[in-house]
Image (cartoon, rainbow, N blue to C red):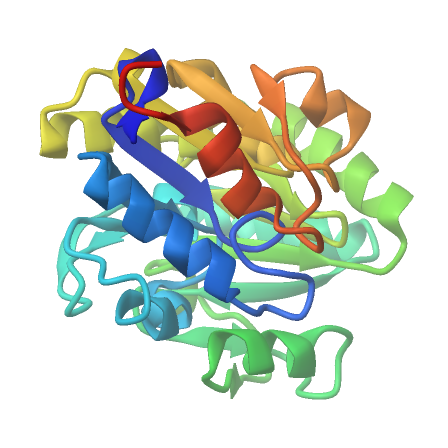
Amino acid sequence: MKAQHNIRLFLADVDGALVTRDKVLTDAAKAAIQELRDAGVAFAITSGRPPRGMSMLIEPLALTGPIAGFNGGVFVNPDLSVIESHTLDPLAAKQTVTLILDQGLDAWVYTETEWLIRDKDAPHVAREAWTVKFDARVVPDFTDAHLAHAVKIVGISDDLDLVAACEKAAQKALGERASAERSQPYYLDVTHPQANKGVVVATLSKYLNIPPEQIATIGDMPNDVLMFRKSGFSIAVGNASDEVKAQASAVTDSNENEGFANAVRRFILRPAGA
């Protein structure tokens, strides 16, 4: 097999695209990644997760290059040593927490090394801990010291319309001082303005010396659209919204129906000589 579109790097979002709804990395997905490598196509992952929350994927995927956590807020090597990090401006971080709480959402704060919450029994805390495989630290409040090291702040609510409205409010209030995008329907991620998935494409292009037009991307959420726009070829998974699908070059099956593996074989690879 060889790559279509002269693709040399395939960059995948993790949750909702690479893994199933139950956070399972399927055998078919692993086999597809090996097929990419056999065809000379590099593979990388990016996620709103902290780097520690992607560590369980490094060995199964045999990752050797940079890994983009926090939507590009922190780039790490496979041993989790930090390559580069983008912390939020402390004043923007403080304004973000105030805005999220005033809008009626819960808030989490991530630093390079810690996940800080105010209530261990709050919605999605247990699920997130199961996903990232480490526990949050409970603090009574988010202090200036915490916010001085904030890499990502998350607004959380099961009122999905409220999260969408908060996204727009945060984008308007923060302007160019931060990037505010939904990473899940119930999560609003706020990061440094240079910490978004479009910049992930540009950064990996620089690190790996691969032009953006030779990079393909796959994702499912509004924050993935930024990497769609910066890459040469983009794929939305079937579980993405119509809004996200409309921004992609192609659409594959859902993450519950081997959407990632099917995308590799249908859109990235082709038989030699074809």
Q: In which quarter of the image is residue 5?
A: top left
Q: Mark yes or no: residue 92 visible.
A: yes
Q: Nearer the viewer, residue 101 or 24?
A: 24
Q: In which quarter of the image is residue 81?
A: bottom left
The N terminus sits in image quarter: top left
**Percent position of residue 186, x then y:** 76, 54
Q: Is residue 233 above or below residue 161?
A: above
Q: In this view, does 246 lie above or below 178?
A: above
**Percent position of residue 263, x then y:** 53, 35
**Percent position of residue 104, x then y:** 83, 56
Q: Mark yes or no: residue 151 visible.
A: no
Q: Which residue is drawn at 23% across and 34% down?
A: 41
Q: In which quarter of the image is residue 165?
A: top right
| Side of 168 where 201 appears, left or right | left
Q: How many labels does the image show?
A: 0
The C terminus sits in image quarter: top left
Q: Which of 259 and 190 is in front in this view?
A: 259
Q: Which residue is drawn at 16% across and 49% down?
A: 65
| Side of 206 where 98 appears, left or right | right
| Side of 48 where 106 appears, left or right | right
Q: Residue at x 45, y 84 (%)?
A: 134
Q: Which of 185 and 211 is in front in this view?
A: 211
Q: Which of 267 and 56 is in front in this view?
A: 267
**Percent position of residue 78, x then y:** 18, 63
Q: Which residue is drawn at 18% across and 34% down?
A: 40
Q: In this view, does 111 lie above or below 234?
A: below
Q: Residue furthest front?
A: 273
| Side of 3 where 258 appears, left or right | right
